[in-house]
Image (cartoon, rainbow, N blue to C red):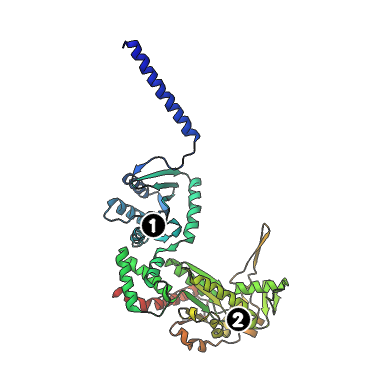
Amino acid sequence: MGWGQLGVSVASGVTVAAILALVRALWRRKRIPTGMSRRVTRRNYLSKILAMSRDERVDGLDAVVSNLMPASGSQAVIDIQEAWAQINQRRGVRIVTKEDKVSLTAGAELLSRGIEVRVARELNTDQVSYHVFDGETQSTVINQRGVVHDRPEKLEGRSLSKVFLSNFEQIWKNSVPLESLLAEEVFGGRHSACDWAHLTERLLEVRAKYHLDAKAAEAVLQHLAFRHCAPVIFITGLPGAGKSLVRRRLANKLSELRFRVDEQSDYVYAFMDFLHGLLRLKDGRGTGFSAEPDGAFCVDREENLQPALYALGNRVWQNRSGTSLTLAEFARSDVVAALRVFGDEVLSTAQVIHVQAPGAVREARLAGRRQPPRIQVIGQSILLEVSDNHRFPSIASQALYASENVSKLEDLSILDGRVYPICNNTDINGWEHIDKELDCFIEHVMRPYKAIVAS
């Protein structure tokens, strides 16, 4: 073959290759990828996550990690956990993972470092994870995990991060705290009489299964105590005693312990009955209600408030199948009769905080209430929001709540040892006094369970 023919052959080969490359490039530009195309080794992926986690400009991290991995001697994972603990000290880290033994074990390791972890059952079959790093700049790393390799993609900018943060908030809201999930595994979801030997045995099994250290075990124990013997906490007392303040402060404290809390008051349901009667909707609700200035109302008899109590009871029953603690607030002169509406199954594992204050103090507080309902028009809907500081007519207080049968409450056998009185007789340093009382209440619930960890 002469040099000329060789040149033609080479040129032809190069031309064909160039044409194929051009066609391939044009095809790639026109097609929509079905997934992240670049594969990297797991070691390189973890190395990138570690480098971003160690960036001191990062002060927050929200991540959905469907395949969360425990350290298991991996220095890369240990370093990432330490870096996340540093971010957590700056502003916070929130991790959502799926429900399997490996991911829960990894979550327990983060829990022992003070990082909040929740479990989303909707991730059980998912292989996609993402990390949103927040700080001076926002970056998101999304990863599709394979058997051996990962397919990550890094996205820069706040606009892109907002999309993932919106998704994260929805998943986070619907997820279960890791401590609560493990606590339910200990007691099996059965709110029966305490068998301390059985609970001790089960906690030891769960500790061994998920390799819980002392700090993680203590966090699980807190959730075990409340989920097992305080899934419902009633806050009772006469109007003006300070029930709403107690409910809000207790909700804050329980949220700090990473419980999901549902705050309920029968006033909302009573106000709905009042509106039904005012609008004459002919459904029988709102009988005996009358309007008062500033959006307040009166009722002829306490029996007229019974439908609101039943509505509150239905909400309590709905919550018992979930993982939230229910704080249920109501005022009745016959508090024992009101509690019986909820049934023995609820009362047998409920706690009652009964708030008391002298009559003169209650009257002064009620006289200072002036916040009317807030009303907004949203499209074709009308949103009405009532306040804890709603006006309470003095005539209602005098007619319905002149006295209370607290002595009968303390003698109610089904609540033996689970009625906790709080005296709220002053508004000076009110939060400080209430907070101390509520710390004592939390200790009161926890005390019988602490011996389990010690054993």
Residue type marked 2? Glu
- Say which element carries label 1: helix
Q: Position of residue 52 (x, y in %)?
A: 37, 47
Crowdedness of circle 2 by 10 Å Cα count: few (<14), some, many (20+)?
A: some
Label 1, label 2: how many angstroms apart (C-alpha)? Answer: 46 Å
Q: Find out whether the residues at labels 1 and 2 contact each other: C-beta distance under 8 Å.
A: no
Query: Circle 1 is placed at which residue position?
Result: 88
Residue 181, picture quadrant: bottom left
Image height of 133 relative to 182, above or below: above
Image height of 371 relative to 38, above or below: below
Q: Position of residue 424 (x, y in %)?
A: 51, 80
Q: Is residue 395 visible from the viewing direction of this image? A: yes
Q: Position of residue 296 (x, y in %)?
A: 66, 74
Q: Quadrant of the C terminus?
A: bottom left
> Of the residues under marks 1 and 2, which one precedes in the sequence?
1
282 horizontally vs 358: left or right? right
Residue type marked 1? Asn
Check residue 363 in the rendering and tell me which mark sits there, or answer none. 2
Residue 304, picture quadrant: bottom right
- Say which element carries label 2: helix
Relative to the observer, which residue lies in front, 275 or 366?
A: 275
